[in-house]
């Protein structure tokens, strides 16, 4: 547990970066600090590992005041990932990952074995271990940064906008990888971002900051989207917060018809019963685009996206192997959307 008790950061010129922050970061979960530029989210994160010291108040790490811990000792026990990965350019990837174990006095073989294990865990080819950072893509470097932060198995991981410098496709992949790792490792993670979509996707808890270092709201993503605390939070969430809420509503209750046809259209399937596209009735054009939804794991937002991709307006339901499981009619989707608007869902 990380606890902020009346924490303020005031600089010499009188600028207040963080103002009387009271917040608890739960153990074993991802807490996201989100807000516009200048709201104090990065300052708050850096006060945890004393990259910046608070002016007033206390930050407790498992009930111990971080100001009473020697900064290098504190930092060796906290993983830290930054935007540009921060890798040492003159060290091979394996030695970059092994940096903290070396500092802790591990022998070289043990440290390198741990580094190789983590490179594999974050989804990197082990052949990259002997390369240098400049030989890797931006996304690969960020994976190395995450591996390095995990090398000494710290209970706490601080991540300061770690995925903001990569393209959207790589960013999505890195977010998915972080969620997969967290499901295995259950670290206490504080993640800073200015992107509300990233915050909602990753956070078990989301803390919204407003300019001036004030905490505007703390809530789980579903509650945040359904019940913004004030006009600032509502505006920051954006006009499409209703669509975002659908990400927390399971598609599992959608009614499915087993026939591969709807008025005017039929689903073309390959020999393994996987969808190929929508085929129009009559002598129309060839196969048309389609979207799929796995009712066991996808959200209602995914079903809506699939419907919008299809000329028929209907998502194609598939099983976990991508095989045809039926069609969700527009009527069934409309009914599900109506149910979802009646109030917060625990889905």
Image: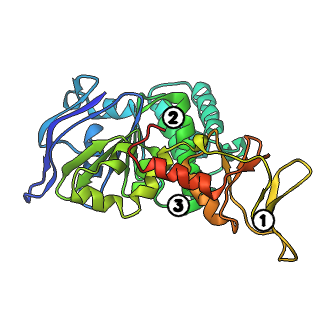
The image position of residue 194, as x and y in percent, is 36, 57
Q: Are marks 1 and 3 in contact (CB under 8 Å)?
A: no
Q: Quadrant of residue 286?
A: bottom right
In terms of secondary structure, where does tag 3 sit?
loop
Q: Is residue 189 above or below residue 1?
A: below
Q: Residue furthest right?
A: 271
Q: Are marks 3 and 2 in contact (CB under 8 Å)?
A: no
Cα gap from disc 1 to disc 3, whole angstroms: 40 Å
> Residue, x 60% and y 35% (percent of image)?
118
* Residue 343 in the image, given as x and y percentages of width and height: 38, 45
Residue at x 92%, y 51% (from the top left corner): 271
**Residue sitting nearer the eye, 36 or 47:** 36
Can the viewer see residue 40 in this picture? no
Q: Position of residue 302 (x, y in %)?
A: 58, 53
Instruction: Identify residue for label 2.
Output: 182
Give 280 or 170, whichever is nearer the viewer: 280
First in sequence: mark 3 vs mark 2? 3
Density class for disc 1 (Cα within 10 Å; few <14, some 14-19, many ≥20) is: some
- Callout 2: few (<14), some (14-19), or many (20+) C-alpha neighbours within 10 Å? some
Measured Cα–Cα span from mark 1 to mark 2? 42 Å
Q: In this orientation, does residue 164 appear?
A: yes
The answer to which of marks 1 and 3 sits earlier in the sequence is: 3
Within 10 Å of the Cα at label 3, are there few (<14), some (14-19), or many (20+) other Cα atoms?
A: some
Is 147 on the left or on the right of 216, as rendered? right
Question: In which quadrant of the rendered image does the N terminus lie?
Answer: top left
Residue that label 3 marks: 166
Q: Calculate the distance from the C-alpha at mark 3 to the C-alpha at mark 2.
A: 21 Å
Name the residue beneath numbered marker 1: 265
Q: Residue 51, how many percent across, how many down? A: 28, 44
Depth check, mark 1 against mark 2: the one in front is: 1
């Amino acid at each position: 547990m990380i606890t902020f008790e009346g924490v303020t950061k005031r600089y010499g010129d009188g600028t207040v970066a963080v103002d009387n922050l009271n917040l608890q970061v739960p153990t074993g979960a991802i807490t996201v600090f989100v807000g516009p530029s200048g709201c104090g989210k990065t300052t708050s994160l850096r006060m945890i590992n004393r990259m910046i010291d608070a002016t007033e108040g206390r930050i407790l790490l498992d009930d111990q005041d971080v100001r009473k811990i020697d900064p290098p000792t504190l930092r060796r026990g906290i993983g830290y990932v930054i935007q540009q990965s921060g890798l040492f350019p003159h060290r091979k990837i394996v030695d970059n990952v092994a940096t903290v174990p070396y500092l802790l006095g591990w022998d070289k073989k043990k440290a390198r074995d741990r580094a190789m294990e983590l490179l594999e865990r974050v989804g990197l080819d082990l052949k990259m271990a002997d390369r240098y950072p400049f030989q890797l893509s931006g996304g690969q470097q960020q994976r190395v940064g995450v591996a390095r932060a995990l090398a000494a198995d710290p209970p706490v991981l601080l991540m300061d906008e770690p995925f903001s410098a990569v393209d959207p496709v790589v960013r999505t992949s890195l977010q998915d990888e972080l969620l997969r790792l967290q499901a295995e490792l259950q670290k206490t993670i504080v993640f800073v971002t200015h992107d509300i979509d990233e915050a909602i996707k990753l956070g078990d808890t989301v803390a919204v900051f407003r300019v001036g270092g004030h905490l505007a709201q703390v809530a789980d993503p579903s509650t945040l989207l359904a019940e913004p605390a004030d006009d600032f939070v509502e505006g920051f969430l954006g006009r499409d917060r209703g669509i975002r809420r659908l990400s927390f509503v399971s598609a599992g209750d959608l009614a499915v018809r087993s026939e591969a046809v709807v008025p005017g259209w039929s689903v073309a399937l390959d020999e393994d019963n996987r969808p190929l596209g929508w085929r129009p009735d009559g002598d129309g054009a060839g196969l048309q685009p389609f979207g799929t939804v796995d009712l066991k794991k996808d959200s209602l937002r995914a079903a809506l996206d699939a419907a919008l991709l299809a000329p028929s307006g209907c998502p194609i339901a598939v099983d976990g192997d991508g095989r045809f499981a039926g069609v969700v009619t527009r009527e069934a989707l409309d009914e599900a959307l109506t149910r979802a608007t009646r109030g917060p869902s625990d889905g």
